[in-house]
């Protein structure tokens, strides 16, 4: 089977987003991290980052927009490319810093999005 089958598994996409957010926040040295969906996926170890197609970005944007709607991320759509930002004041930031793995972040995302 090709790796394309994972696009139909929303859980794979959710796990990739959770892992990337967890990694970016844990490695940050400042109080905020900003990113676009493509750079977010590049931070995950998921096989999805090797097959980035528009459908994948649509799913990632859906997840990120739900996190924005729930106050866990900020969205800057004032430029031609939409950027997302997570800052220290976010509950998601604290969860990423406290967790030893991205599993709690993935569960939070699934609870909010699925």
Image (spheres, grey):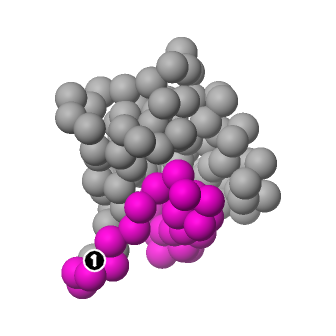
Q: Which residue corresponds to the image point at 39% horizontal and 49% vertical from the top-left?
A: 86
User: Does any portion of residue 46 appear in the rendered image?
Assistant: no
User: Does any portion of residue 27 appear in the rendered image?
Assistant: yes
- Look at the image and give the residue range highlighted in magenta: 51-80
Q: Residue 9's image quarter?
A: bottom right
Q: Position of residue 76 (x, y in %)?
A: 32, 71
Count of numbered labels shown in the rendering: 1
**Judging from the image, what secondary structure is the residue with disc 1 in?**
loop
- Observer-nearest residue: 8 or 37? 37
**Residue underneath mark 1:** 81
Q: Which residue corresponds to the image point at 55% horizontal and 58% vertical from the top-left?
A: 71
Q: Which residue corresponds to the image point at 54% horizontal and 30% vertical from the top-left?
A: 95
- Observer-nearest residue: 57 or 81? 81
Q: Which residue corresponds to the image point at 59% horizontal and 67% vertical from the top-left?
A: 69
From the viewer's perspective, tell me whether residue 13 is left or right of residue 51: right
From the viewer's perspective, tell me whether residue 63 is left or right of residue 86: right
Q: Position of residue 44 (x, y in %)?
A: 44, 39
Q: Residues within 10 Å of mark 1 (few under 14, many from 20)?
A: few
From the viewer's perspective, tell me whether residue 49 is left or right of residue 105: left
Above or below, 86 relative to 54? above
Q: Position of residue 89 (x, y in %)?
A: 41, 42
């Amino acid at each position: 089977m090709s790796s394309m089958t994972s696009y139909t598994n929303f859980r794979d996409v959710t796990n990739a987003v959770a892992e990337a957010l967890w990694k970016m926040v844990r490695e940050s040295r400042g109080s905020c991290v900003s990113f676009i969906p493509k750079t977010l996926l590049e931070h995950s170890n998921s096989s999805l980052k090797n097959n980035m197609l528009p459908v994948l970005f649509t799913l990632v944007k859906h997840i990120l927009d739900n996190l924005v709607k729930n106050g866990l991320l900020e969205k800057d759509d004032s430029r031609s490319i939409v950027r997302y930002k997570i800052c220290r004041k976010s509950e998601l930031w604290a969860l990423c810093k406290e967790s030893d793995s991205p599993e709690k972040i993935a569960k939070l995302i699934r609870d909010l999005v699925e």
